[in-house]
Amino acid sequence: MISDAALLELARRYGTPLFVYDADHAVAQYRALFERIPWPGLEIHYALKANYNPHLALALRDAGAGIDAVSPAEVQYALRLGFPKEKIIYTANNMTDAEFERVCATGVLMNIGSLSRLRKIARDHKGMRVCLRFNPDVCDGDSIHTMTAGALTKFGILLDDVKTVLEIVREGNLHVVGLHEHTGSGLQHAESVYAAMDKLMSIAAPENFPELEMLDFGGGFKVPYRSDEKEIDYFSMGRTIAQKFRDFCDARGKNLKMLFEPGKFLTARAGHLVVEVNTVKRNRDRLIAGCNSGFPQLIRPLLYGAYHRIDNLSNPGGAPFLYDVCGNICETGDRFAEQRELPEIREYDLLAIRNAGAYCYSMGGVYNLRPMPTEVTVSEGKVVGVRKRLSDDALADQIFKECDIVL
Ligand code: LLP
């Protein structure tokens, strides 16, 4: 992992707020999955939505990863980054007809999650190859907002609807080459992975889907965010996953490919957001450390109540105090941490917000017209890519240009 000394040096060189990504860590996580899940036909597709930084994505491409794309722009972007189209799956979600046609034209495999879209394909695109997304009816995830299966979700086709699916497939002479499920993000229990696999495999018999080439069990592998959180025993989980799949393929009489599409597992811990504290003040019994970033740049604490570890890089040995670590946005909820014990924070200290490599920059925006931070990607101790922050002026310019405003 990139050292705190290196983070301080990069912050001096590029300024703050600054996202720093360790490409080697992401690649190591990618490779770790192959060691942990002993299935010869394993393929890992990176969930690009977690972090679309090109330098990070290229490192994963070079390691062999494919892409889980969730919008036509993600498909285009992945193709432009040089991911082969055979290694991209587009998991559509409430797409328009125009979006469907645009992605269709690229030849990328589409993962269809509604009967209505499947019917349209059977009507207008006879003989098409498709993957089908089912709702495995297993609820898990690190927040109610990140559970993507069960009774409350908008995702997937119900397992109960298999009969209808088969009728539509027959009518449209569709080639179902893959089945997919995604239970949630930050899965808390290994049993949820097994249960969801069982559900998907239960409908995957050759009588139903004779042309299957792969089953895709989604993403969701959790990594620790808190210092006292234990890493899941992925070796044990991986063996169970492989054994289940072995039994399934043996019964089927053919070895299929097994796909997972992780985001957090690959990039969460690879990222750090380095911010500078510019104001330390007191509100009666609360100490406020105010810094030069804010929730539009890392929204998980505000949106999900997510915990991100914070370290005081400049004063690691300072005496501990309780702080509200706040941003520079005009909203009370603009806090990275509330009543967090940290070594004494002084003005101009640099803090590192950890696990900032997944769903931070990618969920970001320029609310209050604060430009998104610079992103720096590091490999083998060297900077391999920089995405520069817009200056305040450049951000204003961009809006003027987009709106054709000349005053
Ligand atoms: N596949 C599908 C179809 C997905 O919807 C997702 C995540 C993934 C894979 C990757 O899940 P992961 O391995 O990263 O857990 N913004 C939330 C997470 C939302 C995830 C949405 N879908 C967060 O910050 O926790």
Image: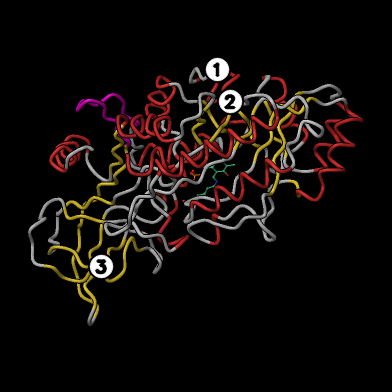
Query: Which mark is drawn over residue 385?
Result: none
Distance from disc 3 to disc 1, alpha carbons, whole Å, reads 45 Å
Residue 111 in percent (x, y) is at 69, 34
Identify the residue at horizontal 70%, vertical 60% (top origin): 151
Q: How many marks?
A: 3
* Mark 1 Cα-neighbour bin, 10 Å: few <14, some 14–19, many ≥20: some
Task: Give the residues drawn in magenta, as a range.
Answer: 375-387
Residue 245 in percent (x, y) is at 59, 35
Distance from disc 2 to disc 3, alpha carbons, whole Å, reads 41 Å
Q: Is residue 124 above or below residue 276?
A: above
Q: Secondary structure at mark 2?
A: strand
- Quick check: is the Cβ at mark 3 less than 8 Å away from ligand 1? no
Query: Which mark is drawn over residue 84?
Result: 1
Residue 200 in percent (x, y) is at 68, 43
Q: Is residue 243 above or below residue 316?
A: above
Nearer mark to the viewer, of 2 and 3: 2
The residue carrying mark 3 is 340
